[in-house]
Amino acid sequence: MKKPIRSFIFTLCILSVNLAMADQRDPRLDELFQAMSQTDNARVSAEIEQQIWQIWLEHQDPEIEARLSQGMLAMDQNPARALNVFTALIEEQPEFAEAWNKRATLYYLLGDYSASADDIEQTLALEPRHFGALSGLGLVRLALNQYLEAQDAFEAVLEIQPSNRNAQQNLEMINRYLRRFTT
């Protein structure tokens, strides 16, 4: 094989790998997480967060993306349909972290904290930097009165996103609560 043809084929392979890199495997995420961890500007952090969420919701298959969107829209009006959509996506695409995260969110909203925590663990196994899943884990632990575990989860969020105001407020609330019982 001639060198230019080999180079062209190599370039095509690289391009196809980059197209397949969506959701939590997307190479753009590393730079975004780096920038997020280094800013204390809430506006800048929110803009970066928006970009990260957009990437997490992407999938190389437009049908998968559309179904995820359908599930998200159904969460309020038709939770049973949303659950079916997310479960089917997970069965078809078990490496798609955002399908796990959305089902975890739905389980939390339905009050099934154990199932929510299980799906959060799957989300974090696929994307350990998933500040949304970590925040959800903190909320699950709060709902279960597991304050030390909730504290750990919100501290992990702040390691990734130092200007996350919700995590800061939840951590302040937990710390005030724990101080009442340790003094």
Image (spheres, grey):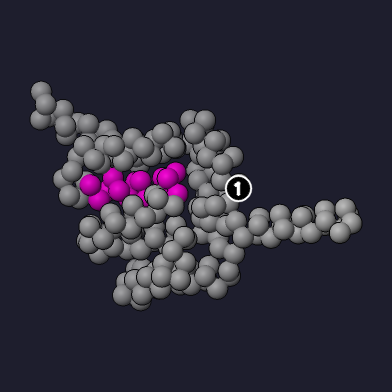
Callout 1: SS: loop
The residue depicted at 26 percent of the width and 60 percent of the height is 115
Number of numbered callouts drawn: 1
Q: Is residue 121 above or below residue 161?
A: below
The residue positioned farthest toward the top in the image shown: 183
Which stretch appears magenta?
127-141
Magenta stretch, main secondary structure, is helix
- Quick one: 66 or 164, which is closer to the camera? 66
Q: Position of residue 108 (x, y in %)?
A: 27, 59
The residue depicted at 12 percent of the width and 29 percent of the height is 180
Amino acid marked by disc 1: Pro
Quadrant of the drawing holding the N terminus: bottom right
Q: Is residue 102 left or right of residue 118?
A: right
Q: Is residue 27 left or right of residue 165?
A: right
Mark 1 residue crowding within 10 angstroms, few (<14) / some (14–19) / many (20+):
few
The residue depicted at 33 percent of the width and 58 percent of the height is 119
Residue 181 located within the stretch drawn in magenta: no
Q: Quadrant of residue 89?
A: bottom left
Q: Position of residue 24 (x, y in %)?
A: 51, 52
**From where the camera sits, is residue 4 visible?**
yes
Quadrant of the drawing holding the C terminus: top left
Kindly identify which residue carries mark 1.
27
Q: Quadrant of residue 48?
A: top right
Q: Position of residue 16 (x, y in %)?
A: 69, 60
The residue depicted at 20 percent of the width and 50 percent of the height is 143
**From where the camera sits, is residue 54 visible?**
no
